[in-house]
Image (spheres, rainbow, N blue to C red):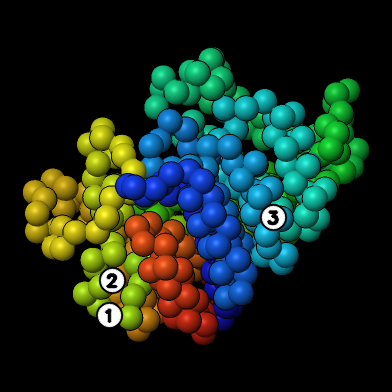
Amino acid sequence: MHSVALSILDLSPICEGGDAGQSFRNSLALAQHGERLGYRRYWLAEHHGMPGIASAATAVLLAYVGAGTSTIRIGSGGIMLPNHSPLVIAEQFGTLASLYPGRIDLGLGRAPGSDQRTAQALRRDLQSDADQFPQDVLELIDYMSKTPRQPVMAVPGRGTEVPVWILGSSTFGAQLAAHLGLPYAFASHFAPQQLMQAIRIYRETFKPSAQLERPHVMAGFNVFAADDEGQAHLLASSWQQSFVNLRSGRPGRLPPPVENYRSRVGPGENALLDSVLSCAAIGTRDGVRAGLQAFADRTGVDEIIVASGIYDHAARLRSYEIAAEAAESLQTATA
């Protein structure tokens, strides 16, 4: 058996009636809360052009969170590398690692984290950028190594050896992470379809590296926890509305919860929610504990990164508190 660590995934949600400044203060409060509760890491995700997500300038926001915390690891879940030159990311995360040594993680994704038009505004040449993701990852790791092979030097960055993770929601990332001997994080909190296949490929084809001796898997999981079952389902309705709106091409701010949301939408929307909520727990501590344990048993993951898209800030903090209590004795058989 091995114990399963718990981490936090934050998209710094902008709620209806709120603004980005409030989101950032809430994000810092969540990271501080997670630190007190014993969460292993706090990660922010890069998205662009999304009315309800404030974490576009991911490294800038991590600097703010780092200044207000002291022990929890902080990082990106993830930086969408096709949007950036590897040198710029090496400098940004080299800066973070210089400010907060031993606490920075660099999770890298291949998707643009936005629509095509926004992606074009970020990096112009989309096709070649996605295709050269593996080369970009290697270039970035080299910039942060103690003895880089490239003539250009990342200052700060060189010698920081920031741990790099590969993120994904398909088997591509699993193959790349295994080939490079890097830890792997799967986005099962919003795209669970290929989770088991990706984990299997990653574990079966993993090659040890200087960073990692054996495979290490983290997977995303939604938790909507409250002290009352009905309240937990009510809280979950904000994220459910937001997800349906996004998939229907109407992205917006995180809306307030509504009673009986599932009964108000049609079979198509409910099928969509059933699929994505296959990696979720909604309920009180006992229900959340059962959900987390079942997920750990099914996947054999080393870490679960918890997303909790709840409208009310105090209720969101309480949800993470209940999840931490529920996971105290979480274990799974070593895969």
Q: Amino acid at mark 3?
A: Gly
Image location (x, y in percent) of residue 329: 51, 84
> Mark 1 = which residue?
228
Q: CA distance from mark 3 to mark 2?
A: 30 Å
**Circle 3 — which element?**
helix
Foreground: 230 or 186? 230
Residue 259 percent location from the top left of the image: 15, 63
Q: Which mark is residue 232?
A: 2
Asked whether the viewer can see residue 176, the reply is no
Q: Quadrant of residue 73?
A: bottom right
Q: Decide: few, some or many residues near mark 2? Use Cα within 10 Å; few <14, some 14-19, many ≥20.
A: many
Residues at discs 1 and 2 in contact (Cβ within 8 Å): yes
Q: Which quadrant of the view contains residue 257? A: bottom left
Q: Give the residue displayed 50% in from the left and 65% down from the top.
A: 304
Residue at 29% across / 64% down in the picture? 235
Q: Is residue 128 visible?
A: yes
Of callouts 3 and 2, which one flags the residue occurring earlier in the amino acid sequence? 3
- Quadrant of the rendering where the N terminus is positioned: bottom right
- Residue type marked 1: Asp
Picture residue at 78% right of the left edge, 42% below the top: 95
Image location of residue 261, percent across then percent down: 15, 58
Distance from disc 1 to disc 2, alpha carbons, whole Å, reads: 6 Å
